[in-house]
Image: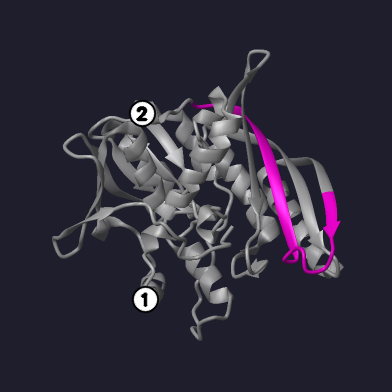
Amino acid sequence: MKKIEIGHGSGGRLTRELIHEIFLKHLDSTELRELEDAASLNMHNQAIAFTTDTYVINPLFFPGGDIGKLSVCGTINDLIVSGAQPRFISAGFVIEEGFPIGDLETIVMSMARVAGETGIRIVTGDTKVVEKGNCDGVYINTSGIGEIRYRMSLKKISPGDLIIVTGTVGDHGISIALSRNEFQIETEIKSDCAPLNDLILPLFDIDGIKWMRDPTRGGVAGVLVEVCEVSGLGIEVEEEKIPVREDVRFVCEMLGYDPLYLANEGRAVIIASEGCADRIMNSLLSHPLGRESAIIGRVSDGFRGVRLRTSIGGERIIDLLDQEMLPRIC
């Protein structure tokens, strides 16, 4: 009998198989079939986006954030990259018996801080406590509702469109890896965990944006492979143009990680027509969260899949990983 492996939660090939062979097989609906970060719904002529996510990160506290901040930022980001202005969030907690109440309060305060800074309202929730040993401290589920402001679709992507990332990649994944104290490496690397609504909302006034996604599990590589699988087109990425912090690059080389596959929690991948690229970049670069934004590649109809042109002039194929480099990163 087949059993769940840790790789089924990676956002890679095993995750895709699980979604198609189990969840879509039995829970199929028009909205679910789109497999977007948020479902696009219509209620009484009001277009809304609805998303949900569950956070099981280890450790619960890490440089740049904690599970509480991560849960609210993650839900905000799933809504904003779906073209929606975030409005309301729910919060469900599964708490292990014996978990320190002081730590729980710190986590909840982080959630309240992000919600207050972004104008998002946490409006409902739930709490469950399980016996000691049946949960790793605390798990959080957050769901979010937003008003759709900008219509995007993978079906709109065409050859010549540009690939933009809104900042350095791999920061979150490496921050979590080092926080687990498995490696004796001291750095100042912090998670990029942040809400993207103020960065992305101004882009809704620019025509020509085709699609967005926040590259969490599976990283930038996972996002680009998905684009190619759905569109039937190719993407060529220039390695030298991918923004990676030098200390992140150093740790990746030391540990054998590829920053393209590492999770990010405060970045977006944007696909847009070349004609609006200057306006998009000017807007992104003017915001503190977008100062490291870069155009890293282009959509092509000359081949299928993702090709990385290396800094030494070579080329390699980017595909989904079968197993997760770093489990429990969100």
Q: How crowded is mark 1: few (under 14 residues within 10 Å), some or many (20 or more)?
A: few
Q: What residue type is labelled 1?
A: Phe
Looking at the image, which residue sits at the far front? 1
Q: Residue 208 carries which label?
A: 2
Front residue (pair 45, 166): 45
Which residue is denoted by mark 1 in the rendering?
250
Q: Which mark is residue 166?
A: none
Q: Which residue is drawn at the image coordinates 35% and 26% (left, top)?
A: 156
Q: Which span is picked out in magenta? A: 127-150
Q: Which amino acid does label 2 sit on?
A: Gly
Q: Position of residue 66 (x, y in %)?
A: 66, 63
Front residue (pair 229, 180): 229
Q: Tell me if I can see residue 222 in this picture.
A: yes
Q: Which residue is drawn at the image coordinates 75% and 66% (left, top)?
A: 137
Left/right of residue 270 with respect to residue 64 in the rendered view: left
Front residue (pair 316, 279): 316
Q: Where is residue 276 in the image (x, y as percent from the top left)?
A: 32, 33
Element carrying mark 2: loop
